[in-house]
Image (tube, grey):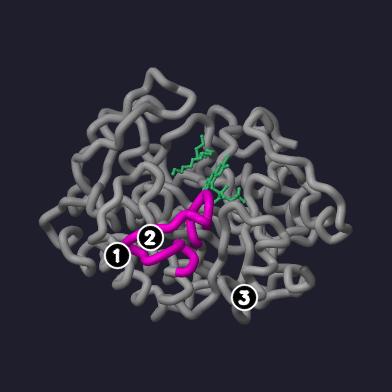
Amino acid sequence: MDNLFQPYALNDTLTLQNRILMAPLTRCMADENLVPTQAMADYYARRADTGLIISEATIIRADGQGYPNTPGLFTAEQIQGWRKVTDAVHAKGGKIFAQLWHTGRVAHPHFFGGEYVLAPSAIAVEGTVPRMRELVYTVPKAASHEEITKLIEDYSQAAANAIDAGFDGVEIHGANGYLIDQFLHHASNTRTDEYGQTPENMARFPLAVVDAISNRIGAERTALRVSPGAYFNMGTDARDREVFDYFIAELEKRELAFLHLGIFDDSMTFDYLGGTGSAYLRANYSKTLVGVGGYSAETGSQAIADNKFDLLAIGRPLIANPDYVAKVKAGETLVEYSDEMLASLI
Ligand code: FNR
Ligand code: 8K6
């Protein structure tokens, strides 16, 4: 597993101390103003020996909220709260990116006291908010051109706020059926204007967000997570393939810090992608790719050796083992993850 412990240069600006990334993990532990707490700073600092921490998804503005107590990056208090986190991680020699999030139609007016949520099209996601079963998802409002322009500005501002808060960069959350992903799939985007119907149109908003943030903070500090396979908060549609073919080809032209697959289990295959999410991205994108989803250090190291991706993100095992990197290095037995562990930050 030596390959996991080699440093990795993302670009001229950022070199990671090893190839194990902490995957973004929503914990719903921010305070009532969506400000990160001292307990969160301690939690992230305990994981500073990973090559890069990607923060839990962090909302860019109030109407992006879809779950209780998810942190934000849009008030001065939230920026200060994150400053405590980034300082604690840096003091221990780590690096940390903020994952920037707007849940789109997976938001709920309950959380921000609004009248409606925004999405590409007025198509509701089925079901109810997890662990808040009384909250049924609402039919979203299809975002107007003005609202789309404002969303792009707010993503860019949140990225600037992340840099103010001391983050080393940002990962745009373009995965898992949230706002950006909603533009990229036919099941959630039926627009007939320049944001819908064709691959070029459906990729327009996601690329505008990528470019606005890259221009604001530098492409070398900007990363993106994508889910070419529809599997979470999203229906499947074989036409999505050509949307992602176009989108990924456009990303290939940009010098992003990395591209990260969004998936819970990378052994899942998608007919229209012709295999797994990581194999599809590897075949269509030549730059730094982060793999994730059900890997152990052993299987992840093997996947890197087999050139399936360059960096390995670890999620649930890092919830169960704050000292994951040290334990793997020393060959110690890991504590197994269980969902009950989500109740507290260890
Ligand atoms: C996640 N995942 C996730 N993904 C993301 O992009 N942003 C997020 O905030 C979260 N939050 C989150 C919370 C919890 C409790 C879990 C279990 C997962 C997905 C995560 O980053 C990762 O892709 C999966 O957990 C698969 O990796 P592991 O856990 O098999 O290593
Ligand atoms: C409240 C947190 C919300 C953010 C993400 C929650 C993650 C939940 C943990 C596991 C859920 C697994 C769902 C996998 C979907 C695959 C469907 C085929």
Q: Can residue 203 be seen in the rendering of this structure? A: yes
Query: 169 or 78, which is in the foreground?
Result: 169
Mark 1: amino acid:
Arg
Does residue 192 appear left or right of residue 343 in this picture? left
Which residue carries the number 1 mark? 241
Between disc 2 and disc 3, whose residue precedes?
A: 2
The one nearer the camera, 330 or 121, is 330
Q: Residue furthest top?
A: 134
Q: Amino acid at mark 3?
A: Asp
Q: Name the residue located 37 percent from the left edge and 42 percent from the top edge.
A: 233
Q: What stretch of residues is rendered in magenta?
A: 261-279
Task: Please give the label number shown on residue 306.
Answer: 3
User: Residue type at mark 2?
Assistant: Pro
Alpha carbon of mark 1 to alpha carbon of mark 2: how far?
A: 8 Å
Q: Quadrant of residue 153?
A: bottom left
Q: Residue at x 53, y 51 (%)?
A: 265
- Closer to the chain start, of discs 1 and 2, is 2
Tell me: residue 294, above or below residue 117. below
Question: Is residue 319 positioned above or below 133 on the image?
Answer: below
Q: Which residue bears the numbered disc 2?
A: 228
Please state which of the two labelled residues, at mark 2 or mark 3, is closer to the viewer. 3
Quick one: label 2, few (<14), some, or many (20+) residues within 10 Å? many
